[in-house]
Image (tube, grey):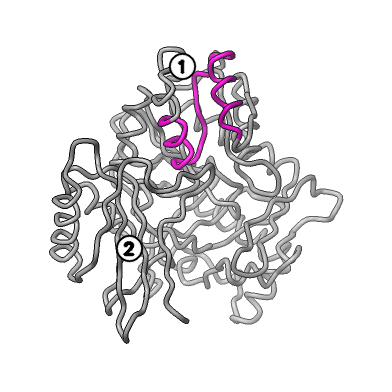
Amino acid sequence: MQNIDFAELKSALDYAANNSSFYKKLYAEQNVNVDTVKTIEDFQSLPFSDKYDLRNAYPLGLQAVPDEKVVRIHSSSGTTGNPVIIPYTANDVDAWATMFARCYETAGITNLDRIQITPGYGLWTAGIGFQAGCEKLGAMAIPVGPGNTEKQLQLMQDLGSTVLCATSSYALLLSEEINKRGIRDKIKLKKGVIGSERWGDLMRARIAEDLGIELFDIYGLTEIYGPGIAIDCECHDGMHYWDDYFYFEIIDPATGKVLPDGEVGELVITTLKKEAAPLIRYRTHDLTRIIPGKCPCGSSYPRIDRIIGRTDDMIKVKGVNIFPGQIEDIIKSVPGLSSEYQIVIAHTDGKDTMTMRVEVEPGADKDTVAAGVITTFKAKIGIKIDCEALDIGGLPRSEKKSKRVFDYRED
């Protein structure tokens, strides 16, 4: 459980209310007087902020410091509207690097490691966050960036990279290439720090086994610095988050009510030290839970569980709500399945249809596996689907995030 100093939380609220034009406007519209917030219960009654609101603040409506204090901006992708522009002060940049270095340390990574960084650079927060944390730690950064698999594998061998930072999709692609080329004995990787997309236990186990490395799940989002705000430890039982920088709440996504530790709901984050773009009660739409009790690793930092999905990545087929986590449970429970899948949804002859495309392990019978998928899907989720079983490699690989759901129904 997070131990929160209410005075610190109130100070963060007052800072945002007095310096952020975004929060001045929000609280004025909601008739909120922050001077009346005197308890944690008062704080929990404050209105939420949301990415959809942040988009309306484009381009720099979130900025809470003078221009001369802003040393960098980052941005969300903006694929469904205006991007969210996040400014950073020098202190924000340093705080982010400090948190990221703490992530590496939690994963047992030291300044003797050589860290190969494959996430993208630029407006996206990933690559530069991995690099800044690496340099703060004092380790060797190998900032290759995304793609160019030939160069990745060459540098991995020639420089003796010991840590791989990547999306799970690209880590899978690299592991397949390494084994296909028979160069695993030339690879010195020991650990992988994987983030930016959900990945199931089967995919995790496959990457770990193929590369012979220990994997660590790292969490973050552009609006809250970027990746590096939480990571799992050697116990791999949830992710430690930095409660000296954030206040985490878990809410019922339908009612907004704060849930007790241990219950699954939507993660809401308040930044405690962010200067250029503070956020108060920011709805992440990520579904997780705060894990009660202290971690066996001995760390005093509290934990959240792995992200099991998002409130906005649910798909509805034949009147049934389906989350990616449910599909990954099916993948785990059907013998002969590999980790990769795609969902194709269409509307034909007045009804929804859903086809699950899967990859089958060598030696498994495709018809038997496909039948198992159809039966298990019906039993666990309650609808009848079709299944197309493919060989390993039959589905496309990605150097970034894998697109898994293709919905061709008309809006």
Marks 1 and 2, the one that precedes in the sequence: 1
Q: Which residue is mark 1?
A: 187
Relative to the observer, which residue lies in front, 284 or 383?
A: 383
Say whether residue 139 is left or right of residue 325. right
Q: Specify the segment rendered in magenta.
A: 148-176
Badge 2, how many Cα within 10 Å: few under 14, some, many 20+? some
Q: Quadrant of residue 190?
A: top left
SS assignment at label 1: loop
Residue 1 appears in the picture as rendered: no
- Dominant secondary structure, magenta: helix
Q: Amino acid at mark 1?
A: Ile
Say whether residue 263 is left or right of residue 135. left
> Magenta stretch containing residue 298, yes or no?
no
Where is 397 relative to 297, above or below? below
Mark linked to residue 284: none
The extreme bottom residue here reads 350
> In x, y percent, where is residue 124?
65, 48
> Magenta stretch containing residue 162, yes or no?
yes
Mark linked to residue 323: 2
In percent of the image, x 64 and y 75: which residue is there? Answer: 26
In percent of the image, x 60 and y 38: which residue is there? Answer: 146
